[in-house]
Amino acid sequence: MQNPDIPNAPTTFANHETRDLLTVEQAANHLQVSQSSIRGYIRTGRLKAFRIAGLRKVLIPREELMALLEPLTEFTELTDRMNKT
């Protein structure tokens, strides 16, 4: 199997896994929130993140980031629509 980022390079477990890990900056951009918000979610335990041993770099699994999202309920959607009119 080929790595799509590097022609003629084999796909490795590490290459696949790093695509599913985001930095604090990438996570904030993805959710359109501040980096401080992402760090706050990590600090309060709402968002699971990992630090690379010996480094300051924090990585967040994409799956954990997506778990922060909550679907809107019908009531919330209706209230939002009413407030816009």
Image: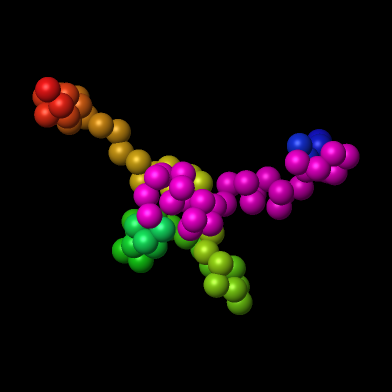
Q: Which colour scheme is used?
A: rainbow
Determine whether, in the image, residue 28 is placed left or right of residue 82: right
Left/right of residue 54 with respect to residue 8 in the rendered view = left
Image: 21 above or below 40: above
- Give the image location of residue 42, x and y in percent: 39, 61
Q: How many numbered callouts? A: 0
Q: Foreground: 39 or 51? A: 39
Residue at left 62%, top 46%?
Answer: 19
Residue that sits furthest to the front in the current view: 85
**Corner quadrant of residue 38:** bottom left
Q: In which quarter of the image is residue 48?
A: bottom left
**Residue closest to the eye, 67 or 37:** 37
Position above or below: 14 against 74: below
Residue 45 visible in the displayed image:
no
Position in image of residue 1 (x %, y %): 81, 36
Query: Where the C terminus falls, by quadrant?
Result: top left
Measuring from the top left, give residue 77's x and y in whole percent. Answer: 20, 27
* Residue 20 colored in magenta in the image: yes
In magenta, the rendered stretch is 5-34
In this orientation, which residue lies closer to the viewer: 18 or 29? 29
Q: Residue at x 71, y 49 (%)?
A: 15
The answer to whether any part of residue 3 appears in the image is: yes
Quadrant position of residue 72: top left
Looking at the image, residue 19 sits to the left or right of residue 10; the answer is left
Quick one: which residue is furthest to the right in this view?
8
Residue at x-position 64% and y-position 49%: 17
Q: Where is residue 20 in the image (x, y as percent from the top left)?
A: 58, 47
Viewer-nearest residue: 21 or 26: 26
Residue at 41% x, 58% y is 35
